[in-house]
């Protein structure tokens, strides 16, 4: 999943970016409200982590304008403002959650999973397609209850497809969701990951819809 991190503090921002990247996320980091607004207008994100005290356009204004133009990307506010009125204002402006600094990365990750499950309209903590089971929290995959080792990129790609089992996802969409700014993507990178997943899960696990993209297939 590709995330937009909006945080002006260099130390906090770099630490969060590294931590989230280690968890397999693609993370674009904007340090000003105007830069974040431009990123949100030009790129599709799975989630936004939004600080409030930003140079130029502040976080609440950015969030309000985002919701005014009917953009429903999930937003978690991350801020040092812990007063009840600040929390209320953030949530009433359209945030999906509100997390006060300092916080543990594990708590942020858990809140991100909750928000994503809520957006997807299900409450299950694991994803299933036939005998295939994926646990986003543990970054683990099982086929017929046998654990299948995955690289971070393979896991991220499989997660994207399993979240929408009946939907065809194009190569371009997968690249956009899995890679952030300044990350090099080879012309056949997605195809290589698909090949490796088929080798591990079965040749029919991922269908190639010619000229369109990929979707979850049948798993024996």
Image (cartoon, rainbow, N blue to C red):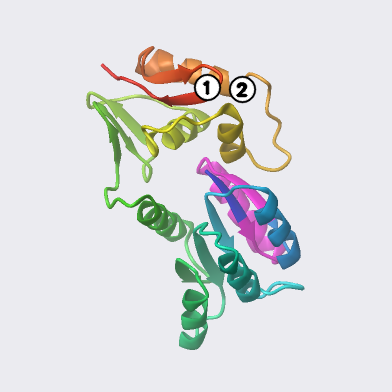
Left or right of 156 on screen, residue 33: right
The image shows residue 77 at horizontal and vertical percentages of 53, 68
- Residue 130 drawn above or below residue 181: above
Residue 120 versus residue 136: which sits nearer the camera?
Answer: 120
Q: CA distance from mark 2 to mark 1?
A: 7 Å
The location of residue 109, given as percent across then percent down, is 44, 54
Position above or below: 28 against 177: below
**SS type, badge 1:** helix
* Left or right position of 135 against 30: left
Check if residue 190 falls in the magenta segment.
no
Looking at the picture, tell me which residue is in the foreground, 213 or 58: 213
Taking 33 as reference, is 17 left or right?
left
The spot of residue 126 in percent (x, y) is 29, 42
User: How many marks do you count on the picture?
Assistant: 2
Which residue does the image show at 52% across and 75% down from the upper left? 93
Q: Quadrant of residue 167?
A: top left
Where residue 66 sits: x, y (%)?
60, 65
Q: Where is the C terminus found, in terms of image quarters?
A: top left
How busy is the neighbourhood of tag 2: few (under 14 within 10 Å), some, or many (20 plus)? few
Residue found 46% across the figure and 29% down from its top? 168
Q: Which residue is mark 1?
A: 193
Q: Which residues are magenta?
A: 5-29
Dot 2 falls on a residue whose secondary structure is helix
Q: Looking at the picture, does residue 189 appear above or below residue 45?
A: above
Q: Are marks 2 and 1 in contact (CB under 8 Å)?
A: yes
Question: To which quarter of the image does residue 179 belong?
Answer: top right
Label 2 sits on residue: 189
Label 1 crowding class (10 Å Cα cut-off): few <14, some 14-19, many 20+?
A: some
- Tell me the residue at 54%/68% (across/down): 78
Label disc, if present, on residue 30 of the rendered structure: none
């Amino acid at each position: 999943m590709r995330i937009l991190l909006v945080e002006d503090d260099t130390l906090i921002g770099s630490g969060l970016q590294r931590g989230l990247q280690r968890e397999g996320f693609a993370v674009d980091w904007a340090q000003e409200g105007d830069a974040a607004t431009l990123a949100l207008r030009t790129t599709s994100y799975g989630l936004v982590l939004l600080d409030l005290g930003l140079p130029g356009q502040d976080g609440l204004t950015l969030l309000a304008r985002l919701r005014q133009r009917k953009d429903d990307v999930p937003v978690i506010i991350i801020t040092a403002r812990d007063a009840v009125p600040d929390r209320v204002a953030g949530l009433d402006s359209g945030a999906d959650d509100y997390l006060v600094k300092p916080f543990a990365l594990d708590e942020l990750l858990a809140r991100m999973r909750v928000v994503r499950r809520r957006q997807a309209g299900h409450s299950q903590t694991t994803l299933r397609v036939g005998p295939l089971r994926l646990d986003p929290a543990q970054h683990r995959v099982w086929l017929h209850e046998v654990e299948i080792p995955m690289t971070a990129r393979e896991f991220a790609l499989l997660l994207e497809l399993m979240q929408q089992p009946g939907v065809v996802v194009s190569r371009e969409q997968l690249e956009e969701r899995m890679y952030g700014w300044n990350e090099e993507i080879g012309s056949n990178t997605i195809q290589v990951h698909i090949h490796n997943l088929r080798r591990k899960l079965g040749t029919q696990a991922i269908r190639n819809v010619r000229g369109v993209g990929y979707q979850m297939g049948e798993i024996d």
